[in-house]
Structures are given as structure tokens and as C-alpha cells.
Image (cartoon, coloured by chain):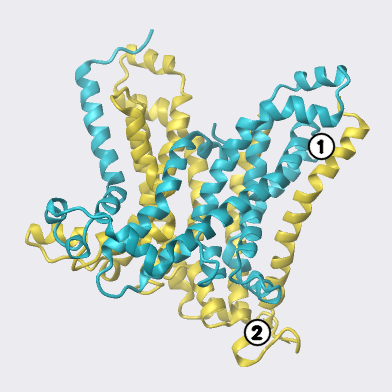
């Protein structure tokens, strides 16, 4: 059993990690909160040394009432929602497929998992230039081969294009987690159902899908947290043009491009609140698995 | 009784799975193919691309013109350094939570996880400002610290779940035999913990290698790792498909191979143990 001695040793060993994470969480957060109540335009000479003007909730109100706010919320929701639907539906399909006996399963798995390891700037640029470019892209060649006018993907169909790129990156993640979950399914249950004459559709909806529900929830929550803050894919493709400005990108522009730190910080606080709402649900599920 | 499957059905599954797999893998394959073509050939129709000659020229051009190896080295230092530093800090923390749990252990773990949920953009300016004041902007040191901090919760969680699987009885037996805390860690725990630590390092090197928010916003020419270097191709001049492909291929190849070896750890690491 743990002695008093080992307890204090344990506390000592945890200290560095706890202190670092506490500092990492609190210091920048406090600064963002502080800036969000201030007028802070570094390019116009505002500086921390001279003291910043207190403006109350003005930044919060201005951020929400600016003409780019609601479009950016809508864009964020469309991208996150679109990617979630595509990755979960195709992920279930892929996991069912990979669970079947087939030749070269290991190799197929490697091909399917690969996009997840491609850095976001590479996948953004590769899709933008080598596939979606309206003159020399792969799709343009295919379109012309069939006598059709090539689509200007990232300007005419900007949101579907971004959703396609991001889905390609996250589909492997969904498929791999769902596959792991499917493989833990008791195969005797399925065999029993099969012998009792349950058709494949029924076996899927009454046995497999309920078994997967927890894994699907985990996929949705984790992806939502990551998808809410996608940045590089938009940065290298459209730079926020053509209606692809997400909330994250809008805040980035306010803070670093136009250097309106107060306004951007207020936006940052909104983003933190939004992410925390999702996080609470995820934490509950993870917390349960700790007890198990 | 094992499920018997007809050869016919297995053949169908195999064909379907390979077709789907090839479609998903195709963009990566295409990048590798284009990287071995002359610039003039790389923009032609897919059929013409495949039938044109092959060359290794792009790889040397990318290195000569853009000092590719410098950015590669930056990536190695940043991804490797942040992961190793994080692991050094995380191992004692995870060890103590796994083997000397207290009532608060679960709360601490959950709290650590919650720091991972903080959207980076929400604290972009504070970090940016601190980097300016501390002279860390566009330095590898700065990025090693930031990436270490953002991955620390995942490292601790992964190590914790691995350590939890080590049987406690063995530790108690060692204690009964009079092993000190130091000996216990060195001779009993370490050999059993090494596979878990290795997997944790592997996954976190991958995550740090591909991190593209802080690396894009906190570096310029000097400390830019491959993520930021590749982004400089977003405003191209003239023909650049083959060179972009060569640069991309070199940036993703090492991590792709590491990724293939880390499939299982990926699930465990990114679901925080919620799916095993």
C-alpha cells in the first residue's frame, strides 16, 4: 500500500506537469480576458506600458454585431457539420468493410489511414493545386476529358471543397476508431442473429449500430473540438475568401492581420466558451471510462 | 464456430476494399508520382503524366533553391525536442497517478485533459506578445516549449493508461523484497513501461510534426519547420507542381511510415482511453 513517504514523492513528481499546465492555461487566458475589455490597437500606438483604455463590453458587442460574425458562425457550422456527416457515415462503411475477411487487409488499412498523417498545409496545397486547380488540376483534366467545363472549385464551390479536403484528412481517424470498436463486438451475438434469420440490415441496425454508439459519440466530440479550430487548410487555400471564413479564422484576422487585439480577444473568449460546451460532453464520456 | 465465408464473397470484399483504399490513398500516390516528373510534364493530363519520363531532378532543385534541409532539421528539432521534453515531465506525473492514486487523481487527469480543449486562437495574441517580449518569436526554442505544452496532456494520458496496465502486485513484491523507490522504478517498472513510452513518443512526434497553427503563426524564415515552409508555396510563381510535390513528398514520407506503425496507439492516444 502507498505509504506517507510515497505519497509525498508522488506529489513531488506531479508538480512540474501540474504547474506547467496550470501556467499554460491560466496566464494566456487571463491576458485574453484582460485584453477583451480594453481598446488595444498596437498599430495605432496602444501599448501595455502606457496603459490601455477600459472599454467595458464594447468589444464583445462589436464582435457580435460586425457584418462578418454571423456568416463566420454559419461557415463554421457548415464545415464542422459537413465533415462530421461525411466522416461518420463513410467511417462506419469503411469499418464494416475492413472488418470483413479479405486479402491484403493490412495493406488496405495502411492506404486508408495514410491521409491522417499528411500535414495540414501539404494536404491543403496538394488539393488546391494538383486536384482543384481549374486549369491544370486533376479534376479539370477529368472534366475536360468528358467535355465538361472545369469547375473553379475553391471559388465557385468553396465550402464543399474545404469540406472535401478536411473530410479526407479526418475520415481515417473516424474509420480507425470505429473499426477498433467493431472488433470488440462479440461475434457470437452476430452469429446467433444470423442463424435466427435476421437479415444484414437488421443485424446492422439492432446489433452493430447500438454497439458502435459510444465510439460514434467519441468520434463526433473529438472531431468537433479539432474541427472548430481548423486553420491551416483555410490559410493555404482561400485565406478566408469566398465565404470560407470560420470563427477561428475571423479571430486570427482580427488579432494578427488587422491587429485589433481587444476585438479579437473578445472573439477568442466566445470561441473558448463554445469549445468548452463541446468539451463538457466529451469529458463526461472520458470520465466514465476512467471509472470502468 | 468460426464464420465460414464463401470465396466469392471474400473476393468481392477484397475488390471493393482495394478500390476504396486506392481512391483514398490516391492524392498521396499522385504527389509521389508528380514529384518524379519534369515541371512541363506535371501539368499535363493524367495519362500524359503517367507516360512521360521520370526524373529525380525536383528533389535536388528544392533543396538547392529553398534550403530544404534547414526546415527539415527545424521540424526534427521541434517535433523531437517537444516530445522528449514533454515525456520527461510526463513520466513521473503519470507514474505517480497510476501507482499512487489519491482521491484527486481522476480530477487532476480530467483537468489536464480540459487544457487540451482550449482553442489555440483564443490565446493567440497573449502567446504572440510573450514571444515578442521574451525574444522567442521565430526560434526553435519557443516552438519546442509551446508544442510541448499543447501535447503534454495527451502524453500524460497515454502514459497513464499504459502504466495502469502494469500489474501492481509486481511492484508490491519488489517493495517486500526491500527495493527502494529508485530501484523499483529503475529495475521493475522501466522495463515494463518502455513499450508504452515508446508508443507515446511515436504518436506525439507525429502530432508535433504536423502541428500547423502555432508553427505557422510563430515562425518566419529562420525557425520555420516543414509545415510553415510548405505553406510558402501557397503563393506560387510559374510552374511549380513538380517542386511542390517533391517538397511535400519529403515532408510527409518519414511521418507516413511512423504513422503506419502507430495505428493502435493513435486510437488510444486520441480518444484518451475512451476507445481501446
Q: Residue B179 at x, y = what percent?
A: 85, 23
**Quarter of the N terminus of chain A within the rendering:** top right
Which residue was labeled with disc 2? A40
**Chain A color in figure:** yellow
Answer yes or no: is residue A249 visible.
yes
Give the chain letter for cyan.
B
* Residue at the (38%, 7%) spot, across then down: B1
Q: For residue B136, what is the image quadrant?
A: bottom right
Q: Nearer the viewer, residue A190 or B4?
A: B4
- Whether the residues at callouts 2 and 1 have beta carbons within 8 Å, the answer is no
Q: Nearer the viewer, residue A221 or A260?
A: A260
CA separation in Å, label 2 and label 1: 44 Å
Which residue was labeled with disc 1? B103
Residue most toward the left?
Answer: A147
Label 2 Cα crowd, 10 Å radius (few <14 / some 14-19 / many 20+): many
- Residue B110 versus residue B261 in the image, above or below: below
- Residue B118 versus residue B186 in the image, above or below: below
Q: Is residue B176 left or right of residue A276?
A: right
Answer yes or no: is residue A163 visible.
no
- Residue A1 versus residue B92 in the image, above or below: above
Q: How many marks?
A: 2
* Residue at the (68%, 27%) spot, across then down: B191
Q: Residue B244 at x, y = what percent?
A: 33, 62
Q: Residue A217 at x, y = what percent?
A: 50, 41
* Residue at the (55%, 67%) spot, across then down: B223
Label 1 Cα crowd, 10 Å radius (few <14 / some 14-19 / many 20+): few
Amino acid at each position: 500500500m502507498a505509504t506517507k513517504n510515497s505519497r509525498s514523492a508522488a506529489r513531488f513528481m506531479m508538480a512540474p506537469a501540474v504547474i506547467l499546465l496550470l501556467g499554460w492555461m491560466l496566464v494566456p487566458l487571463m491576458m485574453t480576458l484582460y485584453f477583451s475589455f480594453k481598446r488595444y490597437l498596437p498599430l495605432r500606438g496602444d501599448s501595455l506600458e502606457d496603459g490601455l483604455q477600459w472599454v467595458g463590453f464594447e468589444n464583445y458587442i462589436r464582435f457580435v454585431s460586425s457584418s462578418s460574425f454571423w456568416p463566420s458562425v454559419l461557415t463554421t457550422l457548415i464545415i464542422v457539420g459537413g465533415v462530421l456527416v461525411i466522416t461518420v457515415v463513410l467511417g462506419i462503411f469503411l469499418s464494416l468493410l475492413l472488418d470483413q475477411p479479405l486479402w491484403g487487409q493490412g495493406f488496405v488499412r495502411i492506404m486508408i489511414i495514410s491521409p491522417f498523417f499528411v500535414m495540414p498545409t501539404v494536404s491543403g496545397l496538394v488539393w488546391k493545386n494538383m486536384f482543384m486547380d481549374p486549369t491544370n488540376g486533376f479534376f479539370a483534366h477529368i472534366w475536360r476529358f468528358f467535355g465538361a467545363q472545369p469547375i473553379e472549385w475553391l471559388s465557385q464551390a468553396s465550402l464543399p471543397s474545404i469540406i472535401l479536403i478536411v473530410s479526407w484528412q479526418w475520415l481515417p481517424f473516424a474509420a480507425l476508431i470505429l473499426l477498433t470498436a467493431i472488433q470488440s463486438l462479440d461475434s457470437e451475438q452476430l452469429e446467433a442473429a444470423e442463424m435466427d434469420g435476421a437479415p444484414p440490415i437488421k443485424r446492422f441496425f439492432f446489433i452493430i449500430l447500438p454497439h458502435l454508439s459510444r465510439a460514434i459519440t467519441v468520434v463526433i466530440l473529438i472531431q468537433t473540438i479539432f474541427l472548430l479550430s481548423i486553420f491551416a487548410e483555410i490559410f493555404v487555400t482561400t485565406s478566408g475568401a469566398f465565404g470560407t471564413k470560420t470563427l477561428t479564422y475571423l479571430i486570427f484576422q482580427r488579432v494578427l492581420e488587422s491587429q485589433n487585439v481587444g476585438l479579437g480577444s473578445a472573439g477568442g473568449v466566445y470561441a473558448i466558451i463554445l469549445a468548452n460546451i463541446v468539451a463538457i460532453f466529451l469529458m463526461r464520456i472520458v470520465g466514465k471510462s476512467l471509472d470502468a | 464456430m468460426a464464420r465460414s465465408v464463401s470465396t466469392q464473397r471474400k473476393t468481392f470484399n477484397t475488390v471493393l476494399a482495394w478500390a476504396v483504399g486506392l481512391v483514398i490513398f490516391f492524392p498521396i500516390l499522385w504527389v509521389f508520382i508528380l514529384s518524379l516528373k519534369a515541371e512541363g510534364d506535371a501539368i499535363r493530363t493524367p495519362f500524359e503524366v503517367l507516360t512521360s519520363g521520370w526524373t529525380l531532378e525536383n528533389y535536388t532543385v528544392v533543396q538547392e533553391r529553398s534550403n530544404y534541409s534547414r526546415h527539415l532539421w527545424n521540424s526534427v528539432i521541434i517535433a523531437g525536442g517537444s516530445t522528449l521534453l514533454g515525456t520527461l515531465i510526463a513520466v513521473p506525473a503519470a507514474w505517480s497517478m497510476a501507482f499512487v492514486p489519491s482521491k484527486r487523481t481522476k480530477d487532476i487527469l480530467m483537468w489536464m485533459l480540459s487544457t487540451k480543449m482550449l482553442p489555440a486562437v483564443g490565446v493567440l495574441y497573449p502567446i504572440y506578445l510573450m514571444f515578442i517580449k521574451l525574444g522567442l518569436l521565430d526560434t526553435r526554442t519557443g516552438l519546442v516549449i509551446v508544442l510541448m505544452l499543447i501535447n503534454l496532456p495527451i502524453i500524460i494520458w497515454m502514459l497513464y493508461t499504459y502504466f495502469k496496465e502494469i500489474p501492481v502486485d509486481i511492484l508490491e513484491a519488489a517493495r517486500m523484497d526491500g527495493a527502494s523507490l529508485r530501484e523499483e522504478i529503475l529495475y521493475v517498472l522501466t522495463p515494463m513501461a518502455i513499450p508504452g513510452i515508446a508508443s507515446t513518443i511515436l504518436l506525439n512526434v507525429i502530432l508535433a510534426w504536423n502541428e500547423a497553427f502555432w508553427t505557422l503563426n510563430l515562425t518566419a524564415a529562420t525557425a520555420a519547420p516543414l509545415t510553415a515552409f510548405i505553406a510558402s508555396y501557397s503563393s506560387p510563381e510559374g510552374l511549380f507542381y513538380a517542386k511542390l510535390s517533391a517538397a511535400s513528398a519529403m515532408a510527409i514520407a518519414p511521418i507516413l511510415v511512423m504513422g503506419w506503425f502507430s495505428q493502435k496507439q493513435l486510437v488510444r492516444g486520441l480518444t484518451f482511453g475512451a476507445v481501446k
